[in-house]
Image: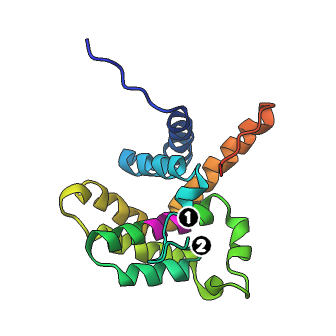
Amino acid sequence: MHPIPRVPVAHRYFAGLAEAAFQGRLGVADPPLVEYMTRLLVRFVHIDTLFRIRDLIGRRLEEVVEMVGEAEQRVGNARREVHRQIGDFTLFWTGIYPETLQRLRSPARKDHFVDYCEQGKRSYYIASTYREGQYAQESPVLERISQQFELCAYGLNEVRRQWEQEAEETPLPRPLLID
């Protein structure tokens, strides 16, 4: 008899929401893409993961312009990882909290002229070109996200709508970002 692997509660919760949104509402029958969206949501429950890119002196990078500059200074797999993070970062804000984009792109910020959708597509595409070894399975998913960025953002917005609806029906608050 094989032991049943433990799946964290957050993963099960977001997997159910992502499957309902992407497969149920949008008709996107792409299990690897839905699993990627689930893992993105689970990772970004912790705000430190959302802002995980650091510059060479260890300063946390919070703007896409800075992250792109950092990606261009890196080579190989490190460059790929920064571009994947940029894609995830832009998709998260565009899909989960689109109302925050106005603040993130305010005139006082470096990201004022950044189109989060276009930069997300570009970064996912760059990350998808790394197809060797450990990246072989994830690369095709990143390429599909690059091509269908707006649909993925819409699907994530549906996920948010679902958890907010559940929160209204349940008296316990469900924070998404944890410090």
| Residue 13 left/right relative to 175 | left
Image height check: is 5 above or below 103?
Answer: above
Q: Amino acid at mark 2?
A: Glu
Say what secondary structure mark 1 lies in: loop
Rendered residue at 59%/59% (across/down): 154
Disc 2 target residue: 62
Q: Position of residue 68 (x, y in %)?
A: 46, 81
Magenta residues, as a range? 85-91
Q: Amino acid at mark 1?
A: Phe
Q: Position of residue 87 (x, y in %)?
A: 47, 68
Q: Tell me if residue 90 is in the magenta stretch.
A: yes
Color style of the picture: rainbow
Rendered residue at 42%/74% (across/down): 123
Disc ID at residue 51: 1
Viewer-proximal residue among 115 and 151: 115
| Residue 164 left/right relative to 86 | right
Callouts 2 and 1 close, C-beta under 8 Å? yes
Q: Residues within 10 Å of mark 2 (few under 14, many from 20)?
A: some
Rendered residue at 73%/66% (across/down): 99
Specify whether residue 27 is in view: no
Task: State the quadrant of the N terminus.
Answer: top left
- Magenta part mainly helix, strand or loop? helix
The answer to which of marks 2 and 1 sits earlier in the sequence is: 1
Q: Position of residue 116 (x, y in %)?
A: 56, 76
Say what secondary structure mark 2 lies in: loop
Rendered residue at 73%/87% (across/down): 108
Specify whether residue 143 is in view: yes
Image height check: is 7 above or below 178?
Answer: above
